[in-house]
Amino acid sequence: MNLSSSLKRLIPHETRQQWKRRIFAVQDVPARMENLKRAGFSPRGIIDGGAFRGEWSKSAWDVWPVPTLLVEPQASEQQLLEAVAKSVPGSEPVECALGDRDGEIRFVNEATNSRIVDSDEGVPVSLRRLDSLLADRPGFHPDFVKLDLQGNELSALDGAGETIRKFEVLLLEVSVIRIGPVPVFHEVDLYMSEKGFTLYDLVPQYYRPRDGALWQVDVFYVRNDSKLLESTSWD
């Protein structure tokens, strides 16, 4: 085993990523969240839609340790998420998928590519609207929402109803190339514009192995009346 492999085994992944950000000024999502903090954004609460095993929430807590809903439909991950949620008071896991109605839907479990399906595949899981989740928690006031839902992000935002106006920053995984039945960047951008949000930041994430073309990006959208958008100065 070479030295590089030995170091990877000994040093936690997130520690290695932090070193990369500091030494090489890597502009990944945690680095851009730090930039939001420097710009003055300080959320009261966070929704982590598609929490999986809570890794994104942990990186967000490094920036803002605030109450967070870790929303994940996979029953197999709930015990782990319960342990993760204990890190920040007021946080809790919620076992459901997010969509435009309350009810039930089929869900395919494929680790990081797990997703809602409109077929007989997968297993039935609870489906909840964002606004009904928040109605159950009147003391929780999230203004930062992250959605990594494998193409179901806009349906989840439809389920926010008028509460979408309470969110100041949204972080969405967005496809640039349409692979499967998912909205692509220009459709998402138009949707967000109609909801009163402006593109604020963008982090390239995945490239298609077929030709090296950009496939997916993580996009930060900011509500039009946010102080983050007040300045028109260069420096």
Image (cartoon, rainbow, N blue to C red):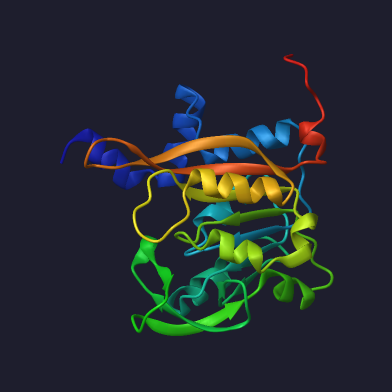
Horizontal arrangement in the rendering, residue 117 relative to residue 34 (left or right): left
Asked if residue 114 is positioned above or below residue 214 in the image, the reply reads below
Residue 133, placed above or below residue 50: below
Q: Is residue 27 left or right of residue 157?
A: left
Percent of width and height locating residue 8: 31, 42
Q: How many marks?
A: 0
Q: Residue at x 33, y 81 (%)?
A: 121
Q: Position of residue 167 (x, y in %)?
A: 75, 54
Q: Residue at x 45, y 23 (%)?
A: 24
Q: Quadrant of the C terminus?
A: top right
Between 139 and 211, the one lying in front of the other is 211
The quadrant of the image that shows the N terminus is: top left
- Res 97 → quadrant: bottom right
Which residue corresponds to the image point at 72% horizontal and 15% vertical from the top-left?
Answer: 234
Work out whether 75 lies above or below 218.
Answer: below
Which residue extends farthest top?
Answer: 235
Picture coordinates of residue 38, whole percent (x, y): 72, 31
Left or right: residue 206 compared with residue 234: left
Residue 129 left/right relative to 76: right
Q: Residue furthest left?
A: 1
Asked if 137 appears above or below 225 in the picture, the reply is below
Q: Residue 153's image quarter?
A: bottom right
Q: Position of residue 26 (x, y in %)?
A: 47, 29
Residues 85 and 174: in front is 174
